[in-house]
Image (cartoon, rainbow, N blue to C red):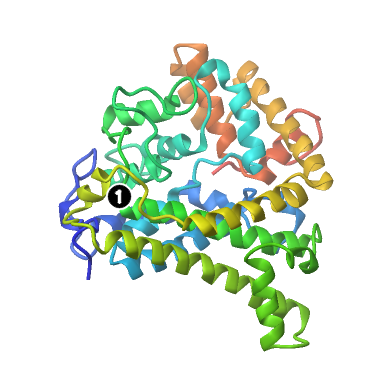
Amino acid sequence: MLKPYATQPDQSRGRRFTEAMSTFRSPFQRDRDRIIHSSAFRRLKHKTQVFIEHEGDYYRTRLTHSIEVAQVARTLAGALGLNTELAEAIALAHDLGHPPFGHTGEDALCDLMAPYGGFDHNAQALRIVTRLERHYADFDGLNLTWETLEGIAKHNGPVADAQGAPLKGDALPYALVECNAGFDLELHGFASAEAQVAAIADDIAYNHHDLHDGLRSGLFSESDLMDLPITGPAFAEVDRLYPGLEGMRRRHEALRRVFGIMVEDVLLVAGTRLGPADLNSAQDIRDLNLTIIRFSDRLFRELKVIRQFLFTRMYRAPSVVEMRAQVTGIVRDLFPLFMEQPRHLPTEWRRDVDTADSETELARIVADYVSGMTDRFAIQEHARLVRGEDVSPMRYL
């Protein structure tokens, strides 16, 4: 049963290209399914979350992260009476635009694309679902609903002011501008409650799994977490209830409590805010002009302490920094190579190059190609094209 302020499927603003309604799926179910079946979603399997894909089979990748975010989003949306299908679709799509090597690869592409309109993974996700996925006969992209596109664009809040000026940076990412020109996403406003759920689900998922992956990597130990807020009390409770518990079980029991604390906190805050409010439509949520799905101030402060710990001990650990430098070099080598010698692009990409009418357009095609690479494909192509190693070329999907 959806609450009045949930996004109602029969009130969707529709798709850019009109399609007949499905006889057995809601519009947001179709969005979710198209995202899952997209090439870009499959490639997330071999894209970095924190650790490079080949560093270990147990670490999260962008794919497993996206699945975990979707699970949290479904749970939160269901408990709050929101549209679980829309929240899940946005969650599954939120990282589609990430290049190889995670934020390291994004930082490199941002620098390389600075003369050509910049690069932003959220905007790139929109470019993928509106333009780069080319499987349907009637349109480019996935032809997602307005509500899903809005959620991808604005799940972290408005990106422009009422006059269209960017809230961050000198200009809006070109990919966002292009998408918005064809289908106005009201970039100055807040998004639906379901989009806000997807955003907080992302925070919950990475706060939880970065602790787990950091422990597994050996960059820090359980004893290091005992003096931190949230994690320290969680381990203490497990030790009280299960004295002498085997190490891996102790870790799991403690971290699932951390997970639960975050979920319950968000539900409590949202319930407190939504309960007394006179909200009768999804638009009423947008018109509040604030983020209503969020952590409490107390928990947010405690999570900042944990994030600072992870920044120091994990994200900036010497071994991680060393790997970041190596993979940054890969992106910085590949981009100019394809700019200068686009013949190395696959045939289907060279067709776009043939119609490019400027260096900027060529750069954006190259950025699309490089950002779509998986970690291992980028490493292999670098070895083949830059270092001249005898490597059988892999197929770019």
Between residues 173 and 378, which one lies in front from this camera angle?
173
Residue at (76% x, 28% y) in the render: 386
Q: Where is residue 46 in the image (x, y as percent from the top left)?
A: 63, 51
Figure quadrant of the C terminus? top right
Residue ID for mark 1: 192
Residue 247 shows in this picture: yes
Image height of 296 relative to 185, above or below: below
Residue at 40% over, 38% down: 126
Residue 361 versus residue 141 in the image, above or below: above
Given residues 300 and 361, the one toward you in this image is: 300
Q: In which image quadrant can residue 302 be found?
A: bottom right
Give the number of marks: 1
The crowding category of the residue bearing disc 1, from other C-alpha atoms within 10 Å (few below 14, some 14 to 19, many at least 20), is many
> Is the N terminus in the top left, top right, bottom left or bottom right quadrant?
bottom left
Is residue 92 visible from the viewing direction of this image? no
Query: Under tag 1, what secondary structure?
Result: loop
Q: What residue type is labelled 1?
A: Ser
Q: Is residue 321 left or right of residue 15?
A: right
Above-or-below relation of 82 to 131: below
- Work out which residue is located at the far front of the displayed protein and give it: 298
